[in-house]
Amino acid sequence: MTKILLIEDEPGIQETIQITLESEGFFVFLASTGKDGIQLVSKDISLIILDIGLPDQNGFEVLKEIRKSFQTPVIFLTARNTEIDKVLGLEIGADDYIVKPFSPRELLARIRAILRRTIPTQFVEESKFRISLDKKLVYFNGKTLNLSPYEYKTMELFFRWPGRIFTREEIMDSVWTEPEDSFDRAVDTVIKNIRARFKELDPDFDPIETRRGQGYGLKEKI
């Protein structure tokens, strides 16, 4: 089940969004403050709906805090319809921006569009490979890849942002949990191992894009 975190302090809007999403099969986590919302963010959350006007801090600050540890897609909700707010929100890492009042149908359409783009294999069953966020497994042609925790977390990061190239530092910041495991070329080793896992099942298949001097990512077209 796809999990969505809603950080919104207005009860009426919170209830409307929750009912809309749950009727479409989403599981909704609720938070009314930025502090509570940050505590609920985890790698099992597929998307965050974040209100800018929260009682304890503004949504921009909440997003900056979230981005220190997670690249989860975020849609901003706001009553302000100024260009500078939109630009600022997108520049600090939001994926979309919707102005109140809004149609629940419009919000739902934007959510589905982002999820199709960021985690395409949850929606396209005919894809060669897919990821299960709940089980923390990656499948290729119906078979489970034997990935280490760091290899899985790297693939999860790539799945969320297909086509984006991550530097080694960005990968380590998002994936590595133990400082003692961080050493020069550690990311290169993980990428090499991921490629080897795929080649065990298909010698000609390589989903990872390497850009010399830049980093690694998931190919947009596979």
Image (tube, grey):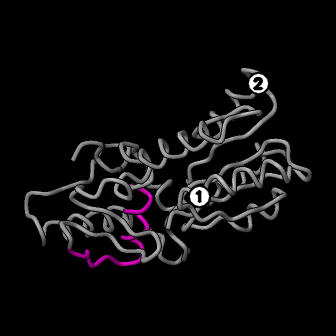
* Left or right of 59, for residue 203: left
User: How far from the left and from the top, in percent, is residue 40?
Assistant: 70, 67
Q: Which residue is label 2 attached to?
A: 81
* Label 2: element kind: loop
Mark 1 closeness class: few <14, some 14–19, many ≥20 residues within 10 Å = few
Instruction: Please state the horizontal and vertical placement of residue 44, each as a whole percent of the image.
Output: 54, 68
- Residue at coordinates 72% horizontally, 31% vertically from top-left? 99
Residue 51, relative to residue 25: is it above or below?
Answer: above
Residue located 82% across and 61% down the image: 35
- The picture quadrant where one finds residue 59 is top right
x and y, in percent, of residue 14 in the image: 77, 53
Q: Magenta segment, which residues? A: 143-158
| Mark 1 lies on residue | 23
The answer to whether residue 30 is seen in the rendering is: yes
How far apart are the two marked residues, 1 and 2, measured between alpha carbons? 29 Å
Q: Secondary structure at mark 1?
A: helix
The dominant secondary structure in magenta is helix
